[in-house]
Amino acid sequence: DAGITQSPRYKITETGRQVTLMCHQTWSHSYMFWYRQDLGHGLRLIYYSAAADITDKGEVPDGYVVSRSKTENFPLTLESATRSQTSVYFCASSESWINQPQHFGDGTRLSIL
Amino acid sequence: KQEVTQIPAALSVPEGENLVLNCSFTDSAIYNLQWFRQDPGKGLTSLLLIQSSQREQTSGRLNASLDKSSGRSTLYIAASQPGDSATYLCAVRLEHSGNTPLVFGKGTRLSVIA
């Protein structure tokens, strides 16, 4: 089915570990985004990408790394996980930068112990 | 810094009632405003996107309006149903985005009681 899929849906890990969250979209959208959603803060942008090999920082990029070697994939890596990175992470994609809606995956619930 | 506020934070209504959700934003320099629905444990589903030049958009029982100059948008839901129960978020697309191209409100949690 076409759409945007995230994996894993749930992940528990320990502080200091590296963890990668995967995002795959089948629409060939140029733009992809990573958000985190926390109580009291709402949705905040971590990183975004305008095309393969083009990425840029969002509002809260510290502690995260992204890559985009292929248009359809946009993995997010926590290089050394901290408890403050416990959150629900959402990937989104959009056909254009301005006037098209963003479409979201179902999220990854990440717990860091 | 753009701030997006949604009031009320939670709302409970009986089935069949018409209702209005509110969204306000502090900076009118926006390209568009988008309304989303989020079900528990799920991602966001785009409902309506209103361009800054538009006044309203309609989809089925949903009607969204935008008053850019006053920094306000409303989402009108007609004849509410229990299946409308969800959290509704609005987000504004900034003209001068920097590292925050889309700024979200914290949502209104809607419960429609059968």
Image: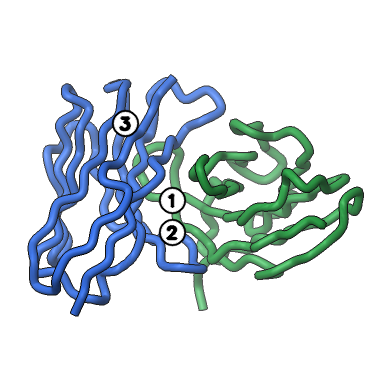
Q: Are marks 1 and 2 in contact (CB under 8 Å)?
A: yes
Element type at marker 1?
Answer: loop
Element type at marker 2?
Answer: strand
Q: Quadrant of residue A20?
A: bottom right
Q: Given the image, what chain letter belongs to the residue carrying mark 2? A: B
Q: Which residue is mark 2?
A: B44
Q: Residue at x 61, y 56 (%)?
A: A88
Query: Disc 2 or disc 3, which is closer to the eye?
Result: 2
Q: Quadrant of residue B27?
A: top left
Q: CA distance from mark 2 to mark 3?
A: 20 Å
Q: Is residue B74 left or right of residue A109?
A: left
Q: Which residue is mark 1?
A: A102
Q: CA distance from mark 1 to mark 2?
A: 9 Å
Mark 1 packing: few (<14 Cα in 10 Å), some, or many (20+)?
many
Vertical placement of A65 versus B77: above or below?
above
Amino acid at the residue labelled 2: Leu
Q: Given the image, what chain letter belongs to the residue carrying mark 1? A: A
Q: Residue at x 38, y 24 (%)?
A: B95
Query: Disc 1 or disc 2, which is closer to the eye?
Result: 2
Whether labels 2 and 3 share one chain: yes
What color was chain B assigned in the picture? blue
